[in-house]
Amino acid sequence: MSLELVLNEKGKEKRKELLSIYLSNHGIGELNCKEQNYFKHIFSKFYTPDEGEEKFNAVEISAVCIQKHNKYNTLCFKMKVNDAWWDASIKRLCGKIRTKNEELNRAFRQAIQEQIDLFKINNTLNPTNICPIENKNLGYDAQVDHIIPFHILRDDWIKNNPKVSCKYKYGAFNYVLDEPFLSNWKIYHLDKAKLRWISKDANKYAHKLYNAQECDVKL
């Protein structure tokens, strides 16, 4: 069987069953290019990380193989990201049933990733700079934050675009807003969003402080 069956399966438990069958039917070794591509799309669409775990971007996966799990000695998928191999359990790969709002939220973030990347280029991280939230060094793992929280910007834009829609695009390995919503959201975000570096820990709760602190940036 092919991982294409998993990719096209809508039911979580059925995806889990198919992944288990795939592991049983394939020997240890690296997947071929076609199957690796299907795996990346499965990872992008369905993989649900543990709480607090960061999910890789599917395009960062350079290789996928089947190996014995180091601890349980069972067959599992392993993926290579930045020269390191990571386990990808079928429990996480089969994912969860995502709501339309969750799909849209991924599409909203995917659309403005270029703006985030450009901010990083034009505002090179200095890990010794002070985090505006925690008043300590940013550190090398600092992250880009929206001064006006992302969800506030998103919800404000949706008020004028209540029929916004998105689709999963295989070329992007992600959900993508349909036009004209994609272009309009990018323009809105470019105009309204104010970005900054904050520490990784601060980025976990900074959005909760927005209403409680004085802020010169308004919608």
Image: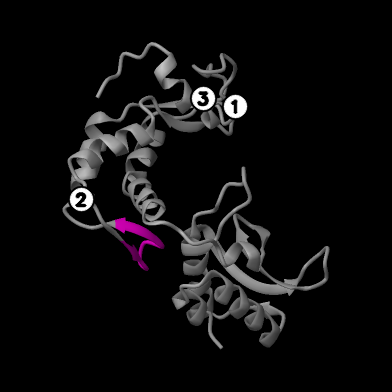
> Mark 3, mark 1: which one is toward the viewer?
1
Q: Residue at x 56, y 14 (%)?
A: 135
**Eyeballing the image, is 126 above or below 118?**
above
Give amino acid for label 2.
Phe
Q: Is residue 124 left or right of residue 47?
A: left
Q: Nearer the viewer, residue 54 or 63?
A: 54
The part of the chain drawn in magenta is 167-176
**Eyeballing the image, is 78 above or below 192?**
below
Give amino acid for label 1.
Gly
**Eyeballing the image, is 126 above or below 92?**
above
Q: Residue at x 59, y 29 (%)?
A: 201
**3 or 1: tag closer to the N-terminus:** 3
- Residue under pointer 3: 126
Q: Which mark is residue 192?
A: none
Q: Which mark is residue 181?
A: 2
Q: Is residue 96 left or right of residue 145?
A: right
Q: Position of residue 70 (x, y in %)?
A: 81, 64
**Eyeballing the image, is 120 above or below 216?**
below
Helix, strand or loop status at disc 2: helix
- Residue under pointer 1: 139
Mark 2–mark 3 distance (CA, rounded to whole Å) = 35 Å
Helix, strand or loop status at disc 1: loop
